[in-house]
Amino acid sequence: MTWYIRLWKFVTLAHGAGGKETEELVRNLIVQKVPPELWKVGEDGAGLDALDDSALIPLGGGRYLAVTVDSYTVKPIFFPGGDLGKLAASGTINDLLMAGARPVAALDAIVVEEGFPVEDLNKIVESYVGTLAENRVALIGGDFKTMPKGQLDGIVIASMGIGFTEHPIVDRNIRPGDKIIVSGYLGDHGAAILAAQQAVGVDLGVESDVKPLTDLMLPLLDRYASYIHGAGDPTRGGLAMLVNDWAEKTGTVIVIDEARVPVRPQVKEYAEMLGVDPLSLASEGAAVLAVAPEKAEEIVEFMRSLGYEQASIIGEVYEAKDPRHRGRVLLRSVTGGVRILEPPSGEIVPRIC
């Protein structure tokens, strides 16, 4: 009897939340069915072997095609700071940027429930196309489907992105000594969606941070590409899931200094009131980088000069001297203690992105 039948008879919301259950499902239900020789294209490519934000296909001459795909389903579809269209376009662009690629094109597939308001559909499409256009990303194709009423909750957008790079970023290249940098406040998107989903309205005074990161990443890549060893946007599962993925892929130990992680006080208080770790909340307009230590301070100053005033060094990568400690993330708390920062599990915030 295979593991997924033994552990679960049915798919749960936790399987789509971006935490441990999602990772286990992808690795064991999908990746294991693909022959290893088909996990990537070309010896220097990256695909299912890397499980990064984008796959990389070598084109020769040191150039790579970066490809990403994601499906977006958020509730509510219009939320403080954005909507489903902006979310889908931003997520697609950011996933390419985190692979070190310059985004050039996108394709979409939109599935809508029968009876969905055309006015709302128009707003979402305008937002999606407008966000791509503002970032000089072409929309080169797509698909549209309608489902019978009651067989889909509103609307789902699948978005594929294409970009090119000569300096690909693959997270398995993260190494001991690297500094962990964040571009700004974390958890704003997760908190804004969580508050919007509550039966009793909560005004946090916080909007989603959803936006493309082209204004940050393209200048960084032009100047510091060879010093950036890992990059990710902490969406589902937040910072906690991202750094746990990095530690597992590289067999290292990552130590995060909680006092240095920029989280708005109201986001932290609201999350803790609901029993949610704020470091597990999603961000849709933040970047997390693993960079060479000799350039870390300089990179932070450069990010601040670009308008990312909360950019900070929040941690460091260490060699796991004891094999039992490989893949572990430690959190140095504000009180001075140290605890293991586990990857999030369960239904963190359903229908978030």
Image (cartoon, rainbow, N blue to C red):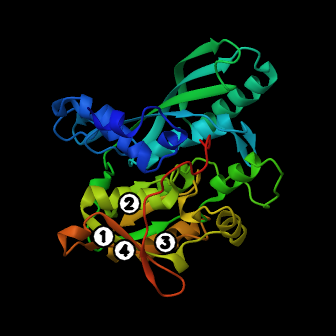
Q: Nearer the viewer, mark 4 or mark 3?
A: 4
Callouts 4 and 3 close, C-beta under 8 Å: no
Q: Earlier in the sequence, mark 2 or mark 1?
A: 2
Give the Cα separation between the discs numbered 2 and 4.
13 Å
Q: Residues within 10 Å of mark 1 (few under 14, many from 20)?
A: many
- Label 1 residue SS: strand
Mark closest to the chain's N terminus, 4 or 3: 3
Q: Which residue is mark 1?
A: 253
Kindly indicate the quadrant of the structure image that contains residue 187. bottom right
| Left or right side of 322 for 163 | right
Question: In what element is the residue under mark 2?
Answer: helix
Name the residue type under label 3.
Val
Q: Give the image location of residue 261, x and y in percent.
A: 54, 72
Decide: few, some or many residues near mark 3? Use Cα within 10 Å; few <14, some 14-19, many ≥20: many
Q: Quadrant of residue 64?
A: top left
Q: Nearer the viewer, mark 2 or mark 4?
A: 2
Write down the residue under mark 3.
Answer: 300
- Name the residue type under label 4: Glu
State which tag comes first along the sequence, 2 or 4. 2
Q: Nearer the viewer, residue 166 or 57?
A: 57
Find residue 40 and report its horizontal and vertical position in percent. Answer: 24, 34
Question: At x 71% / y 64%, what residue is drawn?
Answer: 270
- Say which quadrant the C terminus sits in: top right
Residue located at (47% from left, 39% from top): 103
Which is nearer the N-term, disc 4 or disc 1? 1
Q: Are marks 3 and 1 in contact (CB under 8 Å)?
A: no
Cα distance between the residues tagged 4 and 3: 14 Å
Q: Which residue is mark 2?
A: 244
